[in-house]
Image (spheres, helix red, strand yellow):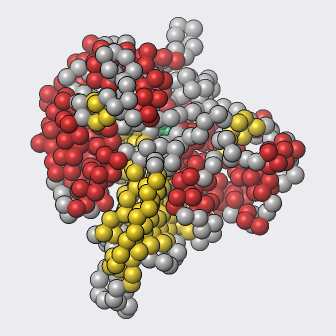
Amino acid sequence: MVRNYFQLRGAFFYAAKSISLLIAFITLFTPSSFAADPAPGAHAIATAHPVATAAGQKILAQGGNAFDAAVAISATLAVVEPYGSGLGGGGFWLLHRAKDRFEVMIDGREQAPAAAHRDMYLDEAGNAIGHLSLNGPLAAAIPGEPAALAHIAEKYGNLPLRQSLAPAIQAAEKGFVVDEHYIKRARFRLEVMQSDPETAAIFLQNGQLPKPGYRIIQKDLANTLKQMAAKGRAGFYEGVVAQTLVREVRRAGGIWSEADLKNYRVIERQPVTGEYHGTRITSAAPPSSGGIALITMLNVLAQYPLEQLPEATHTHLIVEAMRRAYRDRAQYLGDPDFIDIPVERLTHPFYAAGLSASIRTDRATRSAELPGYHLNQRGHHTTHFSVMDGEGNRVAATLSINYPFGAAFTPKGTGVLLNDEMDDFSAKPGTPNAYGLVGAEANAIAPGKRPLSSMTPTFLESDAGVAVLGTPGGSRIITMVLLGILEFSADKSVLDVVSRARFHHQFLPDAIQFEPNALSESLQKELQQLGHHLKPMTRRYGNMQAVHWNKRSNTLSAASDPRGGGEAIVLPE
Ligand code: GLY
C-alpha cells in the first residue's frame, strides 16, 4: 500500500499588525511505510496572545506534541489574558490524535458546588438578583481547567506537566505588559474589580485602570502553577492551594467546600459530528450547545445551492437556519449528565429537513411564530486557540471564565481569578439572567451540574484539507464558527476566514445583528423587504484563531483574527 509522508521543504512568512499569517510550503517527500495518515510535516499555532503562541512554540521545539503545546498555551493564556480564561475557569479541548485518528472532547467545564441550589440567585419574591451570579465568590463554579491540563499532559502528552507549565510560570514571574484589549475589558469591569482588594492589587495599577505598558507580575499565580507542576491535579484540588481557595471563598460569602474541589473530575466526551458538502465536521458536545447548533444549521443549509443563490437569499437562508438552531438550543440543551438530550435527532439531516419545511425564501419567519425561549447573551470574554503539529495531531480549545475577569474575585494568596460561570445557568428558568439570557429547565441550577455553554471548538476535514478553528464571543460564537465554515467551504484563505465580516441571529431578539460593513446598503434593503429586522452594531466582535492544512497544495497556514491582538505561526518540524 502506498502511503504518503510529507516533509517541510521551505517556508515564507507574511505578517501584519494584529494579524500573523505564516505559510509553509510542504512538498511530497517519498512514499514509504510511515504513518497511516499523511502528516503536515510542520507545526501551526494560532492563539489570542503572542506570549501564549511563543509558549506553544517552545514546547513543540522541546519535543512536545500538539497536546503538550495545548497545555502550555492554556496555562500561559491564564497568565497573560486573565480576562478571558484561567486556572479559575474551564473549557473544552477538542483533540485529534493522528496515529489512530482518535477524537475526544476533554470537558473541563466548571461545575456547580454541592451547596448550590436551583433558587440560589432569587430574592424572596422569586426574582433573579443578577449581580450575585456575576460578581464575587457566589458566582464562581468549581474550576475545571487545572484538572484538564493535568489530564491532557498525563494521557496525551509526550512531556511531563511540569515542563509544559514552565513557560506560564515564567510569564507569571516575569510579568506581561497590558495592551489595549486588556484595558478595554478592565474598563468594562473596573468597579467590580475595585471592590475586591486582591483582584485590584493584582490586575489594576494602584487601584485604577492600568496605563498602556504597565507590567503585571503574578507571584501568587506562579506559586499555584508550581504546586501543579510538582503535584499534578492534586496541587490545585488538594492541599494548601485547595484549602486557601475554600477558606477565602467562604470568608467572602461563597459556598465552596474542599470536597467540591477534591471531587471535581474531567470528563472525556464523544464530540458531535456531522457533514457539510463532503466535509466532516467535528465539534463540541454538550454541555456545550455549540456542536449541536452548528450541525443543525449546516444540515439546514446543505439543502440549498447556497453559492448559486443571490446574496439576499443566501444571507436570508443563513439567518433562518440560525434562528431555528438557537430556538432549539434554549429548549433542549444542558448538562447531559443531568438531562436527556436528543443529540442524534437534533443533528440528523431528516430533522433539518423538517426545520427547512417552515423556511420560505420570499419572507422572514417571525421568531414569535416558532415556539421557544428567549436568548440574549453577549460576550467579549473567553478565548480560543488552534494547534496542529507535524504529525497531524491537533487541538481546538475554547476556554472561559465567563464575563471579562470572571467574577473579579481572587482568593488571597492563590493568584487564581475565579470564574462567574454560574451565570450560564438559567437562574430562573423562563426569566432573563443578567445578560437577558433565558433558558429552559434543561439548564436549571443543580449541585454538581455543568452550565450550558456556547463554546464551539471545531475541526473540519475533507480530502482537500483539515482546518482547526474557534473563537470567543458568548452566544455569537456558534454563528461565527458557522460563517467560518462557509468561508472554508468556498475555498477562502485562512486569513479570509478569520477576517470575514460577521452577522448573527439568535432567535430572540428577533433581529439580525451585524458588524459595520457586514451587509451592504442594498443587501440591508433587500433583507428588510423580506421582513427581517436589522440591528447594526457599532463594534466588531470575536477573536477567531484558525489553522489550515491544504492537502492539495501541501500548504500549512495559520491566522489570528485582526480584531484581536493574537499571533499565528507556522514552524518547521
Ligand atoms: N461562558 C461562555 C460560554 O461558555 O458560552
- Count of numbered tags: 0
Residue 331 sits in which quadrant? Answer: top right
Residue 436 drawn at (x, y percent)? 61, 26
Q: Quadrant of the C terminus?
A: bottom left
Q: Which of 290/190 is in front?
A: 190
Identify the residue shown where x is 23% and y is 56%: 59
Q: Residue furthest left?
A: 230
Q: Nearer the viewer, residue 422 or 195?
A: 195
Residue 14 visible at all: yes
Residue at (47% x, 43% y) in the render: 564
Across and down, in percent, residue 512 comes to 72, 40
Relative to 457, does residue 31 appear above or below in the rendering? below
Q: Which residue is found at the position 67% from the left and 41% from the top? A: 516
Q: Is residue 569 left or right of residue 454?
A: left
| Image location of residue 232, percent across then percent down | 17, 44
| Position of residue 65 measured from the top left corner of the image (x, y, whole percent) | 27, 62
Q: Residue furthest top?
A: 124
Task: Using residue 552 as the reference point, say whether residue 405 is left or right of it.
Answer: left
Q: Identify the residue shown where x is 84% and y is 54%.
A: 361
Figure quadrant of residue 213: top left
Q: Is residue 32 left or right of residue 258?
A: right
Whether residue 199 is visible, yes or no, is no
Q: 39 above or below 327? A: below
- Considering every residue shown, the one lying at the far bottom of the view is 1
Comparing 485 with 552, the one in front is 552
Above/below status of 524 relative to 271: above
206 shown above or below 555: above
